[in-house]
Image: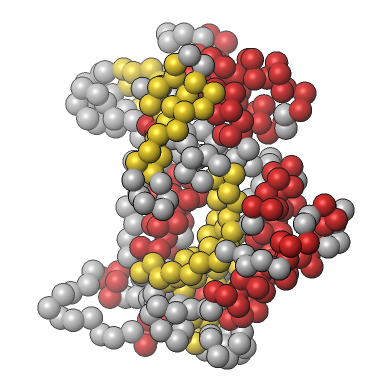
Amino acid sequence: MVELAEIFRRYGPAYRARFGPHMLPSHHKAMRAIEQCRTPALGGQVYECPDCGESRYLYHSCRNRHCPKCQNGNAQEWLEAQRDLLLPVPYFLLTFTLPAELRTLARSNQRLFYDLLFRTSAEAAQSLARDPRFVGGQLGLVGVLHTWGRNLAYHPHVHYLVPAGGVASDGETWLPARGANFLLPVKALSRIFRARFRDALRDTPHFAHLPAGVWQQEWVVHCQPVGNGLNALKYLAPYIFRVAISNRRILKVEDGRVTFRYRASDTGTLRTCTLPAEEFIRRFLQHVLPKGFVKVRYYGFFSPGLRQRLAAIRRQLDAAAPTPDASHPASSAEAAGAPPALTSPQSFVRCPACGQAMCPRPLAHPERGQPP
């Protein structure tokens, strides 16, 4: 199987020779990390099985958040950490997309535009939710930035998981949404989002470089039901830890061209795309986030400073929930109103001979290069 790291090792030097002075430090860092991931350059670790004595040497991972080999177990760990966000109500997925006319500027000014995308979309949702015709209170939102389309095109948008309801102005009373398939009117939400983004961008030097027509066209906003809290979090987790392309999607590298597969968003059919290696690397790097940028953000009653209010909301909803059917008994944790258990990831190394957990021996240093 061809891996992204191999493409970088093979074609990265020429790419850096041509574009290096114009590349962002974060792009240089991501390329270097992916190239060195699980190679002698990072050293390794010897593991021993305490039962059968089998030993195994594994190279260290780079742990870069854009590396396709270093994100496998993180989604489940994140799920475990989100237990406090589970409420016994339906959830919705809200998606706000940056128009194509803004993307060239956004790509060159990522931190500014991504921050504005988060802030103005969350403000738009909260302002409309306060209208008593819809929710009448404050929403809780978990937002995740996603920047790519399935063919690696630049397509910045934010997904929000939102419980079907909000909290009244007294900070205590739960106000359910109007129905299982409706949270907020997306056309009105789109226009509020557009207006708030325009007003926020007006104070920057970039505003004058945008076509006036972008402020008259409709901006794309979607809202869809996604089931209960646990299902919603499972739906969102891959968006947090998925990178622009996984190794299994890369089919071949021939004559300086990379071929990968993707699923068409309009038909759902599998397609292939072949790009020159230089263009493939460029497309991947445009999805590398600025250093320290936080791509998961919490708003409303999901904000870290309001977790006591969230606990009170959960108690209120648990008290109002119907009594479980005796013919389908819940676990003791569920009966007590606790969130359903999430399976913890297996972070240990298994012995290839007997399957037991292996214990690490002292680290091998990177300069030693090869397994002992």
- Coordinates of residue 247 in the picture (x, y in percent): 42, 30
Image quadrant assignment for residue 329: bottom left
Front-lying residue, 77 or 113: 113
Q: Residue at x 68, y 19 (%)?
A: 16
In the rendered view, tell whether residue 341 sits above or below residue 56. below
Query: Colour scheme used in the picture?
Result: secondary structure
Q: Nearer the viewer, residue 355 or 278?
A: 278
Q: Quadrant of the N terminus?
A: top left
Q: Is residue 249 above or below residue 210?
A: above
Residue found at x 29% / y 86%:
322
Q: Position of residue 50 (x, y in %)?
A: 27, 25
14 lies above or below 234 = above
Image vertical order of residue 266 relative to residue 232, above or below? above
Which residue occupies the foreground of this view, 211 or 335?
211
The quadrant of the rendering that contains the C terminus is top left
Q: Which residue is depicted at the point 38% across and 38% down? A: 271
